[in-house]
Image (cartoon, rainbow, N blue to C red):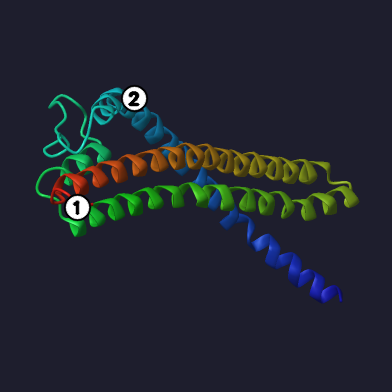
Amino acid sequence: MNTLSNVMFWISNGFLIPVIIGLLYFFVESILLLGGFVSRYVKRSRVEKEIKARLDGLDEGNVAGLKFPDGLPKSRLVCCLEQITASDYNEAVVNKTVSEYELSCGKELDQAKILIKFGPILGLMGTLIPMGPALAGLSTGDIASMAYNMQVAFATTVLGLFAGAAGFVLYQSKQRWAQKDLVRLDFVAQLMKQASAPEGKE
């Protein structure tokens, strides 16, 4: 039994360095994603009013050839809206454009999901692994060893929770953006469909 316990102890301790490396990676990634999110938020704020004003005045009579000002930042949504309305209605092209936009949104959400799930998981592992050596140090009176391992445990907990919290904020915000944008794309696509339909037919 002691042999099995020692083997498990060695195996768990062997995970500590990979866990710390993983936590540092997710911490850096969360910082980069938050920076990109802030940049995108500023850019989106600049185009939001223009997009809303243009879409509120749209109907099947003026949807074709929708254009935005040249000085407006060309976000993915603006490019998709212009692509859908650029020429005669083609349902296959419209569906492809909307689906590709949805896939790109899903890819961004997946990045946030990874932070939400693996940040706290690695943080918990980084907390529990040093607890064994810390308790062993306490039993032998090695306070310095115990303090060091407890420091590692607390630090990994903080990094894991930070990555998870950053992922949660990113996921919630980008999910709302994606839902709003997809509703707009579907609205414009339906207007294009109505505009291209022969008179008297749906």
The reply, left or right, for residue 98 in relation to residue 60 is right
- Quarter of the image that includes the N terminus: bottom right
Q: Residue at x 62, y 41 (%)?
A: 161
Name above or below for residue 185 compared with residue 56. Answer: below
Question: What secondary structure is marked by label 1?
Answer: loop
Q: Amino acid at mark 2?
A: Ser
Q: State the residue in front, 21 or 174.
A: 174
Name above or below for residue 52 compared with residue 157. Answer: above
Q: Residue furthest front?
A: 200
Q: Residue at x 64, y 56 (%)?
A: 16
Residue 41 pos. (x, y %): 37, 29
Cβ atoms under marks 1 and 2 closer than 8 Å: no
Q: Amino acid at mark 1?
A: Lys
Mark 1 / mark 2, whichever is N-terminal: 2
In whole angstroms, how far apart are the C-alphas of marks 1 and 2?
A: 39 Å
**In the rendered image, which quarter is residue 159 located in?**
top right
The reply, left or right, for residue 17 in relation to residue 69 is right
Residue 34 pos. (x, y %): 44, 35
Residue 54 pos. (x, y %): 23, 28
Q: Which residue is mark 1?
A: 201
Q: Residue at x 32, y 29 (%)?
A: 44
Q: State the residue in front, 161 or 187.
A: 187
Q: Residue at x 15, y 55 (%)?
A: 90
Q: Which residue is mark 2?
A: 45
Q: Is residue 12 visible?
A: yes
Q: Residues within 10 Å of mark 1 (few under 14, many from 20)?
A: few
**In the rendered image, which quarter is residue 39 located in?**
top left
Residue 21 pos. (x, y %): 53, 51
Disc marking residue 57 = none
